[in-house]
Image (spheres, rainbow, N blue to C red):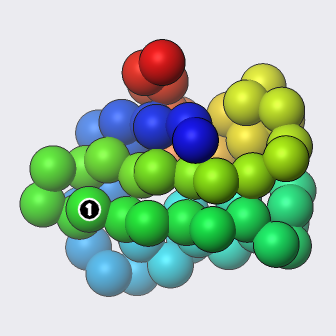
Amino acid sequence: MMKFNIPNMTCGGCARGVTRAIQKVDANAKVEVDLESKWVSVDSSAAAADITAALSAADFPPQQQA
């Protein structure tokens, strides 16, 4: 399980964009978005670096927490 803080995720549309970006890397990824705290939990077999790159490319640069 990976967790990312996405400071510029401010609305439901942002949350959908974040989810889509992650699922482009791993279509089977389980994504849980906490919009209020701006945290996203990801259960995926993909590498954290690949997910970070996809989020950054989608204009949602994350800050990863272990």
Q: Nearer the viewer, residue 16 or 4?
A: 4
**Residue drawn at (12%, 60%), measured in percent from left and top?**
36
* Residue 14 location, quadrant: bottom left
Horizontal side, residue 60 vs residue 38: left or right: right
Q: Residue at x 86, y 43 (%)?
A: 46
Relative to residue 50, is residue 64 depicted above or below? above
Quick one: SS at disc 1? strand
| Residue 45 percent coordinates (x, y) | 85, 47
Which residue is drawn at the image coordinates 45% and 37% (left, top)? 4
According to the picture, the residue beneath numbered tag 1 turns out to be 34
The furthest residue to the top: 66
Q: Label 1 amino acid?
A: Asp
Instruction: Tell me if 7 is positioned left or right of 60 in this view.
Output: left
Could you say which quadrant of the image residue 28 lies in? bottom right
Horizontal relation, residue 47 to residue 22: left or right:
right
In the image, what residue occupies the spot 86% across and 61% down? 26
| Residue 37, x across and y down, in percent | 15, 50
Q: Quadrant of the N terminus?
A: top right
Q: Is residue 49 above or below residue 5?
A: above
In the image, residue 53 sits, relative to residue 40, either above or below, namely above
